[in-house]
Image (spheres, coloured by chain):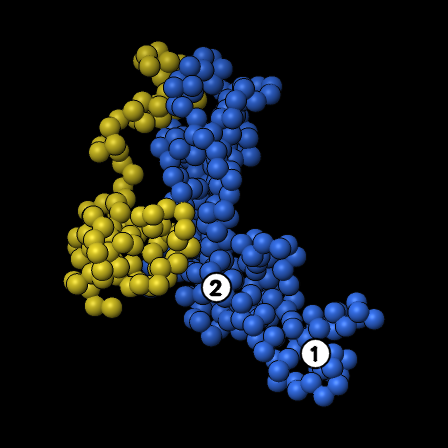
Chain colours: A blue, B yellow
Amino acid sequence: MLADTQRGFAAHLLCGEAGIEESLRPGLPAARLGVYRNTVMGSLAAVLGQAYPTVRRALGEDRFTSLACRFAAENPPRRPMLWSYGGDLPGWLEAAGDALPPWAPDLARLDRAMHEALFAADADPLDPARLASVPPDRVDTLRLVLHPSVRLILAGWSVHALWKDLDAVPRAEPEAVLVGRTDGEVRCARLDPPDGALAAALITGRTLSDAAAEGGPEGGGDLQAMLLRLLHNRLVVGYALDAGPMEG
Amino acid sequence: MTQKTLTLLPIAGALAGALTLLAVPASAQQSGMEKCYGISKAGENGCAHAKGLHSCAGNTNLTYDGGDWKLVPAGTCEKQMGSLKPFEGANPKKKA
C-alpha cells in the first residue's frame, strides 16, 4: 500500500501522472502537488545544466531544459550523489535525434569528461626522475599509470573548437580530446586522430611500444609530444614494467 | 641523455626527449596557452578559476569578472582586452 503510493508519487513527480492526489489525501488540489513536481524536475534540469554547461549554452536555455526534463523523466537519478547524475545524457541525445545538431552528443561527451575529471580522485604525480631511471632497453615495455581524472573522448565533430568558442563553425572532422585535472584545474586539449589513438593506448595501459605502433610515426602520432604533454600536465602518476605495477 | 640512446631506441628516445624538454624552464615551455582574466562571460569561465576546484564547470555568475580567467592562446589575451593578472570587479574595457 505504502509502496504503491510511493511509486505513484514518484511517477507523478517524474512524468506528471495524474490521479495520485486522491490516494494521498482526498480533496488535495493538483496544483499543490505540482509544486513538488516542479521542484524535482527543475533541480534535475539545473544539475544537468551545470554538468553540461557548453551543451546548455549551445542549445539555449529553453531547449536544453525541455530536453533535460524529458531525459530526467526517463532516467531518474540512481545514486544519491547529484554530481554523478546524467552520465547517460550523451547517448540519450544521440538516440533522441530530435533534429538536434549532429555535434550535440559529442559536445555532451566533452562536457561530461570535464565534469568527471573535476570530481575524479586525487593522485600524486610521478617524479619524472623516476622515469629517467628506467633502463633504455626496457622503456619499450613501460606502461604508464595516468591520473584518475584523465579522460579521452573520440568525436566526429570539431567539438574542442566549439567548446572554446560557440561561435565557431562546427566541422564534421574526427578528433580526440584529452581531458585531465592539474592542480585542481580541468584542462583539455585537442588531438588529431593518430595522437588520439596513441593517447587511448597509453590510457588503457598498453606499453609504450604498443602505443607507438597504434598511433606512432606511420600513423602520424607523436609519442614524444604526447609523453611531454602528459608529464607537463602532471598526469602521469606511476608506471609499470612488464609484470606488476612498480609504483603508483 | 646520450646521443646513442636517442638513435638506437626510438621509444626510449621519445621518453628521453620528453624528459629533456620537461626540464626546460617553465617560461620557455610551449604550453601555448596563457591565463587571461576578465574576458569570460557568465557561465563561460572556460573550465577554470583562479581558486581551483570549485568553479570549473563554467560556474561563474559574473561577466568579465577580474577573478575569472580562461585559457587563451599565448599572446592573444591583451588583444581581447583581458589581463594576465587577476583584478577586482568587472573588466572596465569590456561591455557586459
Image position, residue A136 (x, y; %) = 43, 14
- Can you identify the residue that label 2 sits on? A49
Badge number at residue B67:
none
Mark 2 → mark 1, Cα distance in angstroms: 25 Å
Image position, residue B10 (x, y; %) = 41, 21
**How many numbered marks does the figure carry?**
2
Given contact means CB atoms under 8 Å apart, are the residues at marks 2 and 1 in contact?
no
Q: Is residue A234 visible?
A: yes
| Amino acid type for the residue under numbered disc 2 | Gly
**Secondary structure state at the residue bearing disc 1:** loop
**Secondary structure state at the residue bearing disc 2:** helix
Q: Is residue A191 visible?
A: no
Question: Farthest residue in the right direction?
Answer: A1
| Amino acid type for the residue under numbered disc 1 | Glu
A21 left or right of A237 in image = right
User: In the displayed structure, would residue A174 be above or below residue A76?
Assistant: above
**Residue depicted at 35% across the width and 26% down the height:** B18
User: In the displayed structure, would residue A220 be above or below residue A4?
Assistant: above
- In this view, the residue in front, A44 or A30, is A30
**Residue depicted at 53% across the width and 67% down the height:** A43
- Same chain for mark 2 and mark 1? The answer is yes
Image position, residue A200 (x, y; %) = 51, 38
Image position, residue A217 (x, y; %) = 42, 30
- Can you identify the residue that label 1 sits on? A17
